[in-house]
Amino acid sequence: MKRYLLIIAVFLIAEISIGRAQDAKSDSYRMKPFIDALMKKMTLGEKLGQLNLPGAGDIVTGGQAGQDNSSLAQKIKAGKVGGLFNIKGVEKIRYVQQVAIQQSRLKIPLLFGMDVIHGYETVFPIPLGLSCTWDMDLVERSARIAATETARRTSPRTGESRR
């Protein structure tokens, strides 16, 4: 009896796996025409712009904060920016995302990234310094605090701001 149940379980798992693989394949088949059409619409400058991830200047490591970002919205409208790095605050993120999806020619949403290796609001030593403590619980706690603070106060990769 156990042998038959095991065989049935193996077949069920295989069927589920095959079904999921086929669903993923059909999703990629549906996206391919959309992506191909979008790529044909894009100029070379817009394609290069999607690779551009400038710093917004809110969080700066080894530089000066408060740089002039007045031209940033213009660059986003022109399709010269694919995402922003180190932009801090939901209102700012929401504003630049709206510029991208409402005022740019192709309405491509921005991606956002942030360097929180030292923490977000709570500042921690660099990972090399933390490793010298040999306290793995401390290292994990500091990383968890940084991740939690960042997730609560910024936006996920999809570009939607959290409230």
Image (cartoon, rainbow, N blue to C red):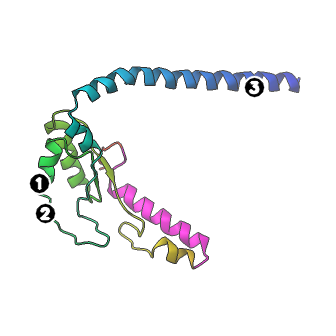
- Give the magenta range: 133-157
Q: Secondary structure at mark 1?
A: loop
Q: Which mark is residue 68?
A: 2
Measured in 3D between alpha carbons, the distance from the residue under mark 2 to the one under mark 3, in whole angstroms, is 61 Å
Measuring from the top left, give residue 48's x and y in whole percent: 26, 42
Measuring from the top left, give residue 147's x and y in whole percent: 44, 60
**34 horizontally vs 105: left or right:** right
The residue type indicated by label 2 comes to Asp
**Eyeballing the image, is 150 above or below 19?**
below
Which quarter of the figure is the N terminus placed in?
top right
Q: Which mark is residue 71?
A: 1
Q: Earlier in the sequence, mark 2 or mark 3?
A: 3
Measured in 3D between alpha carbons, the distance from the residue under mark 3 to the one under mark 1, in whole angstroms, is 60 Å
Quick check: marks 2 and 3 in contact, CB under 8 Å?
Answer: no
Quick check: marks 3 and 1 in contact, CB under 8 Å?
Answer: no
Residue occupied by mark 3: 9
* Number of callouts: 3
Q: Which mark is residue 80?
A: none
Residue at 60% in and 75% down: 135
Q: Residues within 10 Å of mark 3 (few under 14, many from 20)?
A: few
Measuring from the top left, give residue 108's x and y in whole percent: 25, 36
- The answer to if 152 sits in the magenta stretch is yes
Measuring from the top left, give residue 96's x and y in whole percent: 19, 48
